[in-house]
Amino acid sequence: MYITNIQHLLDASEKMAEEMPKEARELIGFLTLVIDATTKTLPSTLTTTDIRCFQKGCSGLIKSAFRPDTGEIHWYCPDCENEGAIGEWQKTKWDNRTNSKL
Ligand SMILES: [Zn+2]
């Protein structure tokens, strides 16, 4: 289970982009895709996206949901059962809510 405060991750990636391991950059890329896809529709139950799991050797399609109780985005890979929650994604550039609701 990955619990990610995306803001911390983005701050870290700006400060140390060069030293950041490839895996960490891939994880950020993955998480921002999940934020982008999930905030378009804010599904309340796990809904399949077109995002591939980032685990090596897994080609599962990620499911994601918005959890209004915590404000987190929950994601889950049905193939390898990898899952996580993303917090503090609001007002990042991948937050698509304002496009539809304002
Ligand atoms: Zn997977």
Image (cartoon, rainbow, N blue to C red):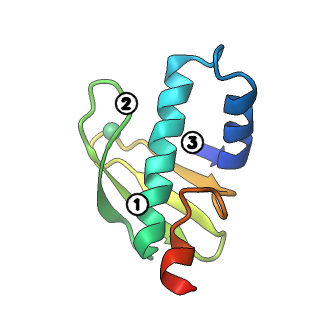
Farthest-out residue, top? 19
Visible in this render: residue 43? Answer: no
As drawn, is 34 to the left or to the right of 24?
Answer: left
Disc 1 secondary structure class:
helix
Q: What residue is disc 3 on?
A: 2
Please state which of the two labelled residues, at mark 1 or mark 2, is closer to the viewer: 1
Secondary structure beneath dot 2 equals loop
Q: Which mark is residue 84?
A: none
x, y percent for residue 21 = 57, 17
Q: Amino acid at mark 2?
A: Gln
Q: CA distance from mark 1 to mark 2?
A: 19 Å
Q: Is mark 2 within 8 Å of ligand 1?
A: yes
- Alpha-carbon neighbours of circle 2 within 10 Å: few (<14), some, or many (≥20)? some
Q: Amino acid at mark 3?
A: Tyr
Say which quadrant the N terminus sits in: top right
Ligand 1 image position (quadrant): top left
Residue 55 in view, yes or no: yes
Looking at marks 1 and 3 on the same chain, the residue that comes earlier in the sequence is marked by 3
Q: Pointers 1 and 3 in contact (CB under 8 A)? A: no
In front: 56, or 26?
26
Any mark on residue 37, and which? 1
Q: Looking at the image, is mark 1 or mark 2 earlier in the sequence?
A: 1
Cα–Cα span, label 1 and label 3: 18 Å
Residue 13: where, in percent of width, then height?
A: 67, 30
Q: Is residue 80 left or right of residue 90?
A: left
Can you identify the residue that label 2 sits on?
55
- Which residue appears at 44% of the width and 64% of the height? 38
Q: Nearer the viewer, residue 11 or 52?
A: 11
